[in-house]
């Protein structure tokens, strides 16, 4: 992609945070009966700073729309193409490097979200999830399950691989009734 | 969103302290995700949930995950739980979207 597009994406990023940088971390070592177990877990929340300081918007009274289903469904195949396109263009020649890939995941997720938003599918909420990892001898499994309305909600997924890294992109679209 | 405490407990109970085993991995991912979804749905709140689980063998390889969401900031939330033991990493992301 051109440098201009990358710069724009970087500027967009500065306004928003990513899950890893915002939120509080809470590290706990499990203790049972005086012994410390071998596992550690951390939980991070996505409470944005200053989120609750703003004046809460007055509750908006919505009128009935009498609309049971979306007028326009989410275009899964178009989004598949978007994912293929973005992953290939950003990652085709890249080698896995910690700093680069950290930035790249954030950039790519913002870019994909912007392109899906450009499709202007009304009343759909979008979630984009990107994972970029180093190719080595490890095994990995990514799974996801959703509790939603399967007639209206859908997802799209694509994976990409080159000689030193792999990337998995998932886009979930949830209808807002 | 306190119910996200639930997802952490669910992950800990489902995975327990097992070492990484290739043949079990399929079963684990499914069971982690299904159990947490079941627990979340038992809460009976008007939310749609998306649960994602990544299980990874500890091998010195790196992994980066990012997510970007277009939703209603006042009502929708997400939570991520990272769990590790000597041989495995597990990352569970839960997104809750208000209906």
Image (cartoon, rainbow, N blue to C red):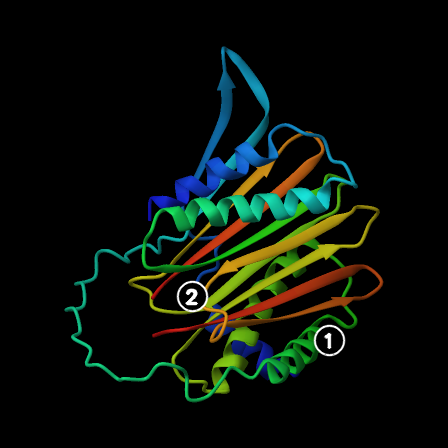
B28 sits left or right of A162 in the view: left
Name which residue lies at 69% across and 37% down: B88
| Quarter of the picture holding the C terminus of chain B | bottom left
Instruction: Please provide percent x and percent y for residue B41.
Output: 41, 51
Query: From what the image shows, is residue B30 above or below residue A88?
Result: above
Q: Which of the chains bears the disc numbered 1? A: A
Instruction: Please provide percent x and percent y for residue B73.
Output: 33, 65
A21 sits left or right of B60 in the view: left
Question: For mark 1, what is the residue?
Answer: A88
Question: For mark 2, what is the residue?
Answer: A16
Name which residue lies at 18% across and 63% down: A56
Query: From what the image shows, is residue A87 above or below residue B89?
Result: below
Instruction: Please provide percent x and percent y for residue A9.
Output: 53, 75
Contact flag, marks 2 and 1 (Cβ < 8 Å) = no
Name which residue lies at 52% across and 62% down: B67
Q: Quadrant of residue B64?
A: bottom right
Q: Which of the chains bears the disc numbered 2? A: A
């Amino acid at each position: 992609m051109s440098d201009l597009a990358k710069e724009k994406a970087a500027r967009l990023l500065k306004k928003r945070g990513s899950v890893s940088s915002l939120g509080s971390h809470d590290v706990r070592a499990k203790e049972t009966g005086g012994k410390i177990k071998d596992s550690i877990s951390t939980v991070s929340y996505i409470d944005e700073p200053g989120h609750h300081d703003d004046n809460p918007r007055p509750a908006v009274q919505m009128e009935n729309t009498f609309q049971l289903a979306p007028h326009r469904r989410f275009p899964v195949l178009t989004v598949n193409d978007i994912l293929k396109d973005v992953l290939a263009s950003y990652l085709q020649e890249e080698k896995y490097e910690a700093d680069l890939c950290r930035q790249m995941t954030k950039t790519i997720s913002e870019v994909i979200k912007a392109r899906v938003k450009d499709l202007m599918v009304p009343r759909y909420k979008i979630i984009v999830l990107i994972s970029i990892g180093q190719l080595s001898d490890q095994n990995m499994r990514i799974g996801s399950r959703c509790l939603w309305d399967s007639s209206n909600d859908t997802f799209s997924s694509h994976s990409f691989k080159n000689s030193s890294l792999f990337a998995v992109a998932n886009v979930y679209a949830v209808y807002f009734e | 969103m306190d119910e996200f405490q639930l997802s952490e407990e669910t992950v800990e109970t489902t995975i327990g302290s097992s070492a990484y085993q290739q043949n079990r991995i399929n079963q684990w991912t499914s069971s982690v995700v299904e159990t947490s979804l079941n627990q979340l749905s038992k809460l009976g709140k008007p939310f749609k949930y998306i649960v994602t689980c990544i299980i990874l063998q500890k091998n010195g390889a790196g992994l980066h995950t990012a997510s970007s969401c277009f939703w209603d900031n006042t009502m929708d939330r997400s939570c991520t739980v990272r769990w590790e033991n000597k041989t495995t990493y597990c990352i569970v992301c839960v997104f809750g979207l208000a209906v």
